[in-house]
Amino acid sequence: QVQLVESGGGLVQAGGSLRLSCAASGRTFSTYAMGWFRQAPGKEREFVAAINWSGASTHYEDSVKGRFTISRDNAKNTVYLQMNSLKPEDTAVYYCAVGYYSSSPDRYDYWGQGTQVTVSS
């Protein structure tokens, strides 16, 4: 069984920054890819960013490229999402997931409970 716990969400003004963290337990964290997804009210869950097992490869959704950075610390079993230049359209519940390096949520086996990010204009 895998447990993922996100933290770091909150309310921020447009142009501000937040850093999300996702702590994993229960699986050999360092051998799997990690992903961040988000879901806004009334919308489907969408891909944000992914990182492979070593951290050498990353992939981003177009709207967050240049603003968000995904990273991982395998010694701490933690993946991060640094979010800069936040926009109101970034408002959503953000989820981390563990699985295979992909932008498809179907490739991820376990999910966290989510953390709310709200960006005010």
Image (tube, grey):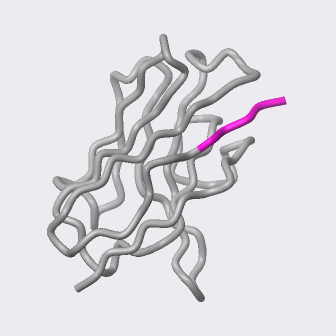
Residue 61: x, y in percent? 35, 59
The residue at 73%/42% (across/down) is 110
Magenta span covers which residues? 1-5
In the rendered image, the quadrant that contains the N terminus is top right
Q: Is residue 2 magenta?
A: yes
In the rendered image, the quadrant that contains the C terminus is bottom left
Residue 112: x, y in percent? 66, 48
Of residue 115 and residue 61, the one placed in the foreground of this image is 115
The residue at 28%/67% (across/down) is 63
The residue at 26%/51% (across/down) is 68
Write down the quadrant of residue 118 in the picture.
bottom left
Residue 9: x, y in percent? 44, 57
Write down the quadrant of residue 113 in the picture.
bottom right
Q: Is residue 11 magenta?
A: no
Furthest residue toward top: 75
Q: Classify residue 25 as left or right of residue 121.
A: right
Q: Classify residue 20 as left or right of residue 68.
A: right
Residue 74: x, y in percent? 48, 16
Write down the quadrant of residue 80 in the picture.
top left
In the image, residue 38 above or below residue 6: below
